[in-house]
Image (cartoon, rainbow, N blue to C red):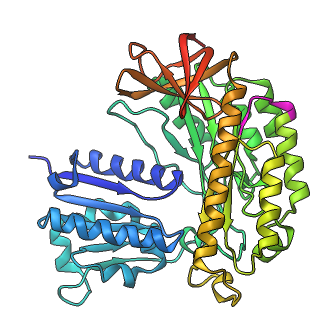
Amino acid sequence: MSRKFYIATFGCRTNQADSAAIREDFLNSEFEEAGHHRDAEVIVVNSCTVTHRSDQQVRQLARRMRRDNPNARILITGCYAQRDPKRVSRIEGIDAVVGNTRKQELVTLSDPEQEASSQQVSGSPRIEHDNFEKKRAIDLQEVTIIGGKTRPFVKIQDGCDAKCTYCIIPAVRGPSRSVPPEQIIQQVERLIAGGFAEIVLTGIHIGTYGMHLTPRFPLDRLLEELCALPGLGQLRISSIEPMELSRRVIDLASTTDRIAPHFHICLQSGSDPILRQMLRPYNTGRFLGIVQEIREKIPQAGIGTDLIVGFPGETEADHEATLKLLEDAPFTYLHVFPYSDRSGTVASKMTDKVRSETIRRRADELRQLSDQLTERFQSRQLGKEIQFLTLTEKKKGFREALSGNYLKVRVAPSIPGNQLMKGMVTRREGEYLHVDEASSR
């Protein structure tokens, strides 16, 4: 009888892509996926460590899973396991801690007999943790998605060479590394053949894709190659850094419906002094020039951004500058992150920390602004034809869809999932746009 596994994933789309590859490894090793952690013999927690809150959530979930399933073998991997394996190993009931460099060994480590070969002190978790190699090319994590899922993630890049003072990611993901283009093209061809209408390209610093390959193969060239594939529905580009978003990518997206009109570009602060403290390689003027160019060339594009609230030294004037910039810029939504010290970063040693209650207030103000920006963008869609992808899971009385410009859409429940369609927006209700009549793209 097959053993059952369960994967819990925290964090970004890159982590979700990693979990899909881990899932594939277990399925190829004659495991069966459990629908709930209580039913699994092996539990993998793919962790995030971008904030203290992320670490706390991983610890809380691991303890709850151990209480719910005392006989399961629990393995913690991901960025928290890579950053602080000793701290993770102190979570009661954990069987192994596996860093990002050793994820391919999770199936082997799921075997209880592996405990016999562990060099750890009796009763303590096994720790598998290495430093990153300096190579600049990585192999693709091949994924065959089953079970009715839509929007598969293809990880084309990992790691980061930036030196942002607040960020621990380069330490837990290593230097920027790219998947050779031929591997990506073959994977996308397989997903097209599998019937997937939208494919998401993801990575940690996706804008640096191909810059260290020999010969260089930049992101815009990869997108051109993928857009030429027969049968491709739609590509979606995940989060990208502003100075790495080339005009060629914007121009390509403006001339084809095979790239979703959606850009998530990381701002982090609307204050130039704070951007300098963060070591971000741009100022607000250059950033605004990029997003305004997108709006001019792709008027219906969804444009989102990330913001860190309460970075050390952030004054009320800095916060007001951020609010003013966001009110005037063509954003359609904001992802707001309260600043969190990460041990080992430059910012963690800065002394002029912002009070927690001030951070909460400023974050609330930005989230309220985000709601206003989204409502304004939704209203602009009324009476216009939009393209959208129907999702797999039905809601009560309707099927949810996702527009190319990243808005939630309601369509008739009789429409199948995983279909690229178009239709006129008739009204807005809460977080959804309504499309009463839809047709294939």
Query: Residue at position x 80%, y 64% from top?
Result: 320
| Residue 2 point in image, percent of width and height | 13, 47
Asked if residue 223 shows in the view, the reply is: yes
Q: Quadrant of residue 377?
A: top right
Horizontal side of residue 399 vs 327, given as left or right: left
Horizontal side of residue 397 vs 241, given as left or right: left
| Residue 296 point in image, percent of width and height | 87, 33
Above or below, 43 against 358 in this view is above
Asked if residue 260 shows in the view, the reply is: no
* Residue extending furthest toward the left: 1
Q: Quadrant of residue 235?
A: top right
Query: Residue at position x 38%, y 85% from top?
Result: 86
Q: Which residues are magenta?
A: 296-302
Quarter of the image that includes the C terminus = top right
Query: Residue at position x 58%, y 79% from top?
Result: 341
Asked if residue 190 lies in the magenta stretch, the reply is: no
- Nearest to the observer: residue 274 or residue 42: 274
Query: Residue at position x 18%, y 88% from top?
Result: 122
| Residue 201 point in image, percent of width and height | 59, 42
